[in-house]
Image (cartoon, grey):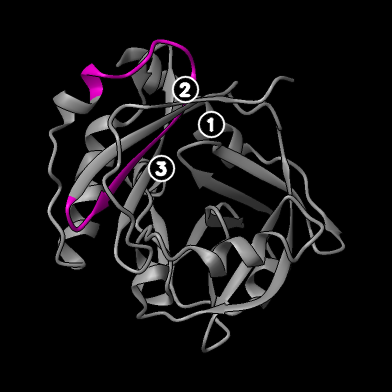
Amino acid sequence: MSPARKKTTSIPQGFTPWLGVFETLRVSAGEIEFAKEHFASLKTAARALGLKVQASLRDLSAQLPRPNGRLRWIVEPQQTYAIFSEEAKPVKKAFSLELAAQRLGSANWDALYKTLSYLTHWQARHSVVADEALLLNENSAVASGAMANIFWVRDGKIFTPSLRAGCRAGVVRAWVLRQRKVREGIFQIEALDHADEIFLTNSWIGIRPVNRWGHRALKIGPVTRALQAGMISELNKR
C-alpha cells in the first residue's frame, strides 16, 4: 500500500505541544462522519483548556478533499487548523487487547480530552504486542484503551468505565450510550475476565469486537454485532 498522502487545509503558524486539543474524524467520500458531534467535543475540550476554536464547522468542511481518509482538527492558543490524510477505511474485523504498564491520572486533562500531550497513550499502545492496550488509572480501575473507549457485556448487560475513571467522552462512546442501557462505573480489571463480549469504540474504527483479551479468546457476540449494524444504518441515512 502506498503511503498516505497528507494535505493541510491551512498552514500552521506555530506549535504548542503542552497546550492544545484535537479531534480525529473519519471521512467517507468527502463526508465527515458524526461531524456535529465531533465539533461539539472539540469545543468542550478547548473550553476546558482555556482555548477558543477559531473556525466554524462549515469553514472546515468546505475545504475537505473528496477521498476517504482521516481528518484531524487541531486547536492551539493562536490557531485552529485541519490536517487530512487520504487513507482506506479500517478493515480489521476484531482486535486483540492486552494490559499496558502505563497508568492514566483520572483527573488529568490528557486522560479526559484529546490533548496534544498524547505520549502516555502512544507509549501504551506500543508497549504491547496486541492490537490495542488497556489502560488503568492511578487506582487500578479500568479507564480505557490507548486509542479507544472500552465496553464489555456480561449476561446481556453492557458496562463501560465512567468518565470519573479517566476515559474520554468519545463520540462513538456517546452514540452507544444513546442506543442501549449501559452501566457506567468504576470497575476493576477482573470485570473483563468475566465478560461475554468486549468491544472498542472510536471514530476511526467505529465499533470493533475484541477477540482476545490477554490469553483469553472471545467470540464476537450478538450485542456487538447489533450495535455495529445499527451504527452503519444510521450513518447511511445521514
Quarter placement of the N terminus = top right
Can residue 162 be seen here? The reply is no
| Label 2, label 1: how far apart the Cα atoms are | 6 Å
| Amino acid on which the number 1 mark rests in the picture | Gln
- Residue range of the region highlighted in magenta in the rendering: 61-78
Query: Helix, strand, or loop for circle 3?
Result: helix
Residue annotated with mark 1:
228
Which residue is drawn at the image coordinates 19% and 58% (left, top)?
77
| Sooner in the amino-acid sequence: mark 2 or mark 3 | 3
The one of 125 and 165 positioned closer to us in this rendering: 125
Within-10-Å neighbours for mark 2: few <14, some 14–19, many 20+: few
Within-10-Å neighbours for mark 3: few <14, some 14–19, many 20+: many
Task: Tell me the number on the disc at residue 172.
Answer: 3
| Image depth: mark 1 or mark 3 in front | 3
Residue annotated with mark 2:
232
Callout 2 touching callout 1 (CB < 8 Å): yes
Location of residue 93 (image quadrant): top right
Question: Is residue 64 a member of the stretch shown in magenta?
Answer: yes
| Sooner in the amino-acid sequence: mark 1 or mark 3 | 3
| Label 1, label 3: how far apart the Cα atoms are | 11 Å
Query: Helix, strand, or loop for circle 1?
Result: helix
Image height check: is 147 above or below 144?
A: above
Can residue 224 be seen here? The reply is yes
Q: Position of residue 54 (x, y in %)?
A: 12, 43
Question: Is residue 198 a member of the stretch shown in magenta?
Answer: no
